[in-house]
Amino acid sequence: MPTPSSIGQRFTQLIQHLGLSKNAFAQSLDKTATVIQHLVDERNKPGYDLLCKVFEMYPNVSKDWLMEGVGPMLKTDAFGHPETAGSPAPSPAQPEADLFAAPTAPVELPAPSVAPPPAPVPVEAAAAPLPAVVALPPAVVAPGPTAPPPAAAPDPAYLTVALQTQYLQHQLALAEQRNQHLLEQQALMQQLVAVLQGR
């Protein structure tokens, strides 16, 4: 793949090679996505601190390639193979000889514990008659409270008739109240007529 001429294009190629989005690449460098977008769009040039952060987070990226477009994108190992971008730098915490060294002391495993065999049963005990089995009366179980049967769903026709009956009873009660009121008015009118006639 030809080396891109501008640093913005090389950043684009690096992000694609890492398999990251611009936002994820920006987060890995503690930068905002706007900074990376302006860099990719070649509105801005990368600063010194941003370049240092890139080479710190991705030590296998070639500085000559990213800054000047010279050579391959990734540094090569001792065999001339390109290293994987984004892989952490090897830590010299332990030399290779120690990794394959045999343990100094043999590991002793605990001896398996074997249970002693059971003691033999005397012949007299084996020949002794077994005690008689006493039959017990069956236990009487008191009947527990029975669960009530599930309530059946009400019939829609029954509900309609019940509602109509309740409505008619209400109307009848209102009619009786009106009738009582009319009787009271009639008695009052009769009293008024009797008073007027007495004059």
Image (spheres, grey):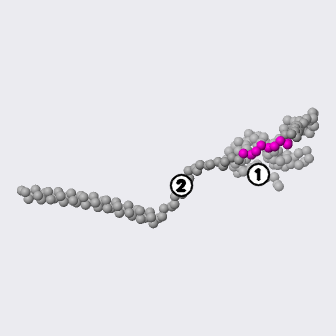
On screen, 46 above or below 168? above
Viewer-proximal residue among 95 and 79: 95
Q: Earlier in the sequence, mark 1 or mark 2?
A: 1
Identity of the amino acid at label 1?
Answer: Gly
The answer to whether one can see residue 139 in this image is yes
Q: Quarter holding the C terminus?
A: bottom left
Q: Which residue shows up at 74% across the image and 46% down it?
A: 133
**Snapshot quadrant of residue 176:** bottom left
Q: Which residue shows up at 75% across the image and 41% down it?
A: 53
Q: How many numbered marks does the figure carry?
A: 2
Q: Which residue shows up at 53% across the image and 54% down it?
A: 148
Q: Which residues are magenta?
A: 126-134
Question: Residue 182 appears at what percent x and percent y?
Answer: 22, 60
Question: Residue 69 appears at what percent x and percent y?
Answer: 81, 49
Dominant secondary-structure state across the stretch colored magenta: loop
| Front disc: 1 or 2 | 2
The residue at which mark 2 appears reads as: 148
The residue at which mark 1 appears reads as: 19
Q: Residue furthest top?
A: 105
* Mark 2 secondary-structure assignment: loop
Q: Which residue shows up at 66% across the image and 49% down it?
A: 138
